[in-house]
Image (cartoon, rainbow, N blue to C red):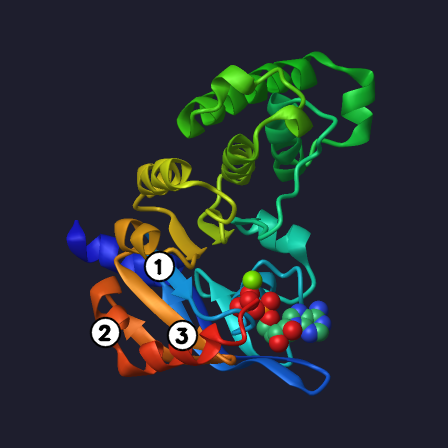
Amino acid sequence: MSQLAATTSTDQALVISGLTRRFGGVTALNGVSLGVALGETRALIGPNGSGKSTLINCVSAVDRWDEGTVTLGGAPIKGRDPVGAARRGISRTFQTLRLFDEMTVLENVMVAMHHARGYGLFSAITLGPRFRKAENRMRHEARELLALTGVERDAERQAGTLPYGHRRLVEIARSLALKPTLLLLDEPAAGLNDTETARLAELVRRIARPDLSILVVEHNMEFVTSVASQVTVLDNGNIIAEGTPAEVREHPEVLRAYLGSSEDDK
Ligand SMILES: Nc1ncnc2c1ncn2[C@@H]1O[C@H](COP(=O)(O)OP(=O)(O)O)[C@@H](O)[C@H]1O
Ligand SMILES: [Mg+2]
């Protein structure tokens, strides 16, 4: 059993190898290699501008890259193909919130399900019984995801009218609607207060599953420590440390990177 699990997790994991992304003269990622196993929650930390969002953008294929490879389950992900990446089970949230403010919370989650299951305009217009049945099933699943993330009471509200912390949770519910094997969270606790951050950490622990890899970008070390077993530290596009939260916190390179950058931080 454990042998099988070990084989599967190597096959299914995210493997980033020698990833380089340049923007003109800026090397945002400089030959970055890192892996996330199935069932693992890994945190990605680093000062502002160190390349964290660029890495998330490459892996989710929102962006392209100059050198290196990204594979999921042993098969390559190609750049600038976010729909292809989503079909492969890669789901993400954005550093700046992206919800359809005019739609209800429930609709926001259901949109992602339509997208994932490839229901075309034709079946939606004709409203055939198969579509309606699928629609009911999706509605049910969407409600379950809202319950999981703790915002089920907001289901019928317009997303734009929700407090910020709740909208963040809706975004996570929506990212789960794709039934991902890899979940990428870019600063999910940004703008949250301490109580909301603690609640979010509890949620991230709750969504962790043996068949899901989670890569979470976060600054808040308390949050990182409570959700991730392993931490990768980026600085200037290079990995400068890797280890448990306790290990990286004491790492001289990490201390230097954060102290050095604190003067430049806005
Ligand atoms: N689309 C872009 N065009 C030009 N430069 C970019 C672009 N995206 C990111 N960069 C640059 O790449 C570096 C890494 O940025 P980013 O990945 O956003 O950092 P982080 O998320 O760690 O704060 C920064 O120097 C940033 O200015
Ligand atoms: Mg960023």
Residue 65 vertical position relative to residue 174 in the rendered view, above or below? below
Disc 1 and disc 3: Cα gap in Å?
19 Å
Ligand 1 within 8 Å, label 2 CB: no
Q: Point out the tag, 1 or 2, that comes first from the N-terminus.
A: 1
Image position of 129 (left or right of 12): right
Which residue is under mark 2?
250
User: Circles 1 and 3: CB distance less than 8 Å?
Assistant: no
Disc 1 and disc 2: Cα gap in Å?
18 Å
**Circle nearer the viewer, 1 or 3:** 3
**Could you tell me which residue is drawn at 32 percent across and 38 percent down?**
202
Across and down, in percent, residue 46 comes to 44, 70
Across and down, in percent, residue 149 comes to 43, 30
- Please state which amino acid type lies under the numbered disc 1: Arg
**Secondary structure under the numbered disc 1 in the rendered image:** strand
Which residue is under mark 1?
42
Looking at this view, is 113 or 6 the one in front?
113
Residue 253 vertical position relative to residue 2 in the rendered view, above or below? below
**Could you tell me which residue is drawn at 23 percent across and 54 percent down?**
4
| Residue 140 in view (yes/no) | no
Across and down, in percent, residue 156 comes to 62, 15
Which residue is under mark 3?
258
**Could you tell me which residue is drawn at 49 percent across and 19 percent down?**
152
Across and down, in percent, residue 73 comes to 44, 60
Q: Point out the tag, 2 or 3, that comes first from the N-terminus.
A: 2
Characterize the local packing of mark 3: few (<14), some (14-19) or many (20 or more) Cα atoms within 10 angstroms: some
**Secondary structure under the numbered disc 2 in the rendered image:** helix
**Could you tell me which residue is drawn at 62 percent across and 49 percent down?**
96
**Secondary structure under the numbered disc 3 in the rendered image:** helix
Looking at this view, is 217 or 56 the one in front?
217
